[in-house]
Structures are given as C-alpha cells and as structure tokens.
Amino acid sequence: TVDMQIILLPGTKVQEPLIGVFIEERSPAVEGDIDGIKQSYDVGIATQQRIVDLEQELQFTRENLQATVEELETSNEELQATNEELLASNEELQSTNEELQSVNEELYTVNAEHQSKISEMFEVNNDLDNLLANIRVGTLFLDHKLEIRRFTVEITPFIRVIEQDIGRPFDHFSHELKGVDLDSMVRRVNSSYESMEEEVQDSSGNHYLMRIFPYRIAPNLFSGVLLTFIDINSTKKMQKSLLQSEERNSLAQEAASLGSWDWDITRNTLIWSDNIEKMFGFGIGEFGGSYDDFVRCIVPSDRKRVEDEVNKSLSDPGRPYRLNHQIQWPDGSLHMMRESGKVHVDSQGNPVRMVGVVQDITEEHLADVGRQRSEQLFRVTLENLDMIAVQLDREGRVIFANDYLEEITGWNREELLGASWFERCIPSSQREEVRRLFTAFMKGEVNMVAFHENEILCRDGSSIRVLWNNTPIFDEMGAPFAVSAIGQLVNREQ
C-alpha cells in the first residue's frame, strides 16, 4: 500500500507544463485495534520523508527559479537589444524626419520657383501676345506636323484662317500670293532647317517681305515652321521714288557735267558715278577704284596741291574740300575739273569717309582764259589811252586804274585798288547821286552804255571834272559784274 501525490509544477513560458508525481510507501500498521483496533505510526519516518520531499521541492523550485532568472536575463538582454534597436530606429526616424523637413523646405522652394516661373511665363506670354498684336507683322506658327498653332490677323488678307482653324493642316488652306508655291517652300524649310526669304505680292498688289524659318526649340533642335510677312509697300514706294530721284539726279549731273564720288578711307576704295568715268576719259568699269588711281589721273603739276588739300580736310574734318585742278585723259588731252567734298568721321572723330562731286569746267576754264586775255588786252589798251580809265566791281570798289589817272589825280594805283571809288574819289556833295546812278546802272535801270559827268577828287584835295563813258562787263551768265569807265577831262579847278 502506497500514498501517491500528483502536483502541477511551476514552469516557464518556454517550457512544456510539468507534473510531479510523488509515491510514498505506507508504513506498517500500528498495533492496535482496527475499527477500534489500536494502530501505531512512526512519526520520525514520516517527518524525514516530508523533509526529503520538501528539499526535493525546494531544489526543484531553485532550479526553476534559476531557469526563470536566466530566462529573465535573456529576456532582459533581448529587451535591451530591442531597446537599442528602438533607439536606432528612433534616431533613423529622427534623421528621416529631418530629411523630410529638408525635402519639405526644398518643395517649398521648388514650389516658389515654379510659382515664379509661372508668373514669368504669364508675363512672357502677355509680352508675346502684345508684341504679335502691335508689331503689325503677319505671323504664322506651324508645329512639327505643319498644323496651325498660332497666327496674327495681319496674314488673314492673303491666307484665309480663323481661330477655329488652329490644329488644322496648313496645306488645307489656299493663299492669294502671286507665283508662290507656299506649301512646297514650307515643307522644304521643315525638312532642311534652312531659312528662306523672298519678296512676294498678293492679288491686291500689296508687297510683303516673306521669311520662313525653322522653329527652334533648343540648339540644333527644331520642331515646326515660323512664317512672317512684313508689309514693304512704303519701302517699295521709297525705292521707286529713290530710283526716279537717282535717274533725275543722274540726268541733272550729266546735263551739268557733274559726277559724284565716295571714298572709303579705311579701305581705300573709291566709288565713282558712271559719268565721272566718262568725264575722266575712261570707259564704264575701266577705273581702278582706289584713291591712288584717282591721283594718277591728275597732271603732275597739280598732284601735290590736290593731296595737300585732301590732307588738310582729313586733319580738320570741318574744313571743306574745294579746288580746281587739271587731269590728263588716257589719250593725253587736258581737262579742268572743279572738285568739292566733305569728310565724315566716326564716333571717335576719326575720318572714315569722304564724299563729294566733280564738275568738268574745261569750257568755262577756256572761256576764263580767253576772257583774262581779253581783259589783259583791254587793260593794255586802257593804259595807252590819254584818258582816265577805271574799272569798278559791283560794290563800287576799284579793280583797275590806268597810269593816266595816277598822273592827273596824283593817286597811286596801290592806294586805289580795293578801295571804294565813291568814298575815295567822289566829293561828298555828289557822292550820293553818283552812287545812286551807279547802282541803277548795274541793275539795268538806266542805259547800260551811258554818259554822265561829275567831279573827282585828286590826292592833294583839288577836284577835276570828268565826262564818263560807262561800259558794263558781263560774266558767263550774261549778268554785269563790273563796269569799265573811261573819262575825258572837262576842266581843272585849283
């Protein structure tokens, strides 16, 4: 006979549940009566057994406690590791939060930049709209498929498009430009990326400068075509007017034996009008075209004088260039030229260009030479007369006086030349009347070959009375520029 105890042992979370089974042999029956029969028990043996059981239980409890402690230490280590991981995760989250904050700030910055770009694009779009609306240039934008993207109203008179046509292919539209295959030109520019420019005219007679460009979206990258039409009616009218003016000017220059020239000083190129080449004895295009070629045409005796005048004008651009000189034709004949010009300077004041005109005055020069010879002969004749002879210019200044005048009046010729005849030689009482008569004579208001009588003063203060025969001297235009007066002595008063 035994006593058996079954006890559920305390365990850990990681262990399977344990049960302790304790079996104890019963001690022999104590002498006594059963059912009143007296029994005897050995208390020492039971106590000893109980102690053993308790010791075993205590040992088991200690082992369990040690296992629990070890498990707690393991759990603590695991918790410590988990805590460290949580701390690391927290740091990572903190870093991520900071990164997110930085990204958020960057997003704010990018958003502000985008907002600024949108505002700039809005302004640029407004600028473009205002530009297209106010430059008065017909403009047509085509995309890469040659479909209409945008246009200005200035093209509608010759290309019939409206707002609803945006997005339609360009080749669906006709135009009113004369002799222009516009669709072919647009396709050529779209494929070759090379611009085209041409003057065109519509059916109403209006002139336009048409330009077709590839639509650039990046360096060396194109997508579409841009067409512009600039109204050049006023320019064409000006060109026509300028051409007519040039024709009239050419005719006037030819009639007046005038020619124009333009000397580019920096390049040393000289451009002559066609009639100057003829004036200088060259055929059209035979002139060399430089300043040195011009100098070679000048007779050697005049070259230094011409070059000196040119250098003076270049050193002082405000000084006019004007002189007469002779040239020699290729056939050896001599001709007299009258030149005048003006120097143009750049922003620094350096001479860069000189323009002017030249006139063939050979006939005038020959006439002057003949007139000078005639005047010399006439004055020689006057010198040999036994009469007073004097010549006055239009202002009444003495330009000639003969020896007989000096002899009779005592005036030296040097004292009279350039002096006023009225102030020097006419008594004050007659001065106004003689001046009035002279002025009327020069204006043709009195007989151009006239006689009159008046007194003249001598150098010593005395006066003589002279009967004058006045003859006008005419210039090449037939106008009187001087008068020759021959006087016959009437009497002499002391």
Image: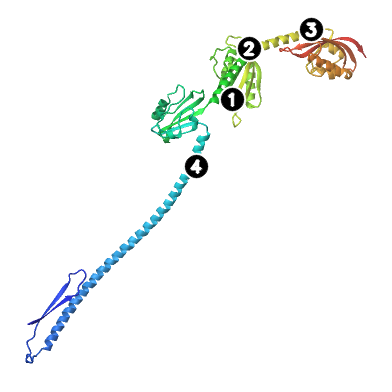
Identity, as a three-letter code, of the amino acid under mark 1: Arg
Identity, as a three-letter code, of the amino acid under mark 4: Glu
Q: Earlier in the sequence, mark 1 or mark 3?
A: 1
Q: CA distance from mark 4 to mark 1?
A: 46 Å
Front: mark 1 or 3: 1
Q: CA distance from mark 1 to mark 3?
A: 51 Å
Quadrant in which residue 87 is drawn: bottom left
**Label 2 belongs to which residue?**
335
Number of callouts? 4
Give above or below for 185 relative to 248. Answer: below
Residue 362, position as x, y percentages in the image:
65, 11
Disc 3 residue crowd, few under 14, some 14–19, many 20+, Cα 10 Å: few
**Label 4 belongs to which residue?**
123
Q: Which quadrant holds the C terminus? A: top right
Residue 281, position as x, y percentages in the image:
58, 11
- Is mark 3 in CB contact (under 8 Å) with mark 4? no
**Label 3 belongs to which residue?**
381
Identity, as a three-letter code, of the amino acid under mark 2: His
**Label 1 belongs to which residue?**
353
User: Which residue occupies the extreme right position in the image?
Assistant: 494
Quadrant in which residue 340 is drawn: top right
Q: Earlier in the sequence, mark 4 or mark 1?
A: 4
- Is mark 1 in CB contact (under 8 Å) with mark 2? no
Q: CA distance from mark 2 to mark 3?
A: 31 Å
State whether residue 217 appears in this view.
yes
* Residue in the image at 31% along x and 65% along y: 83
Disc 1 residue crowd, few under 14, some 14–19, many 20+, Cα 10 Å: many
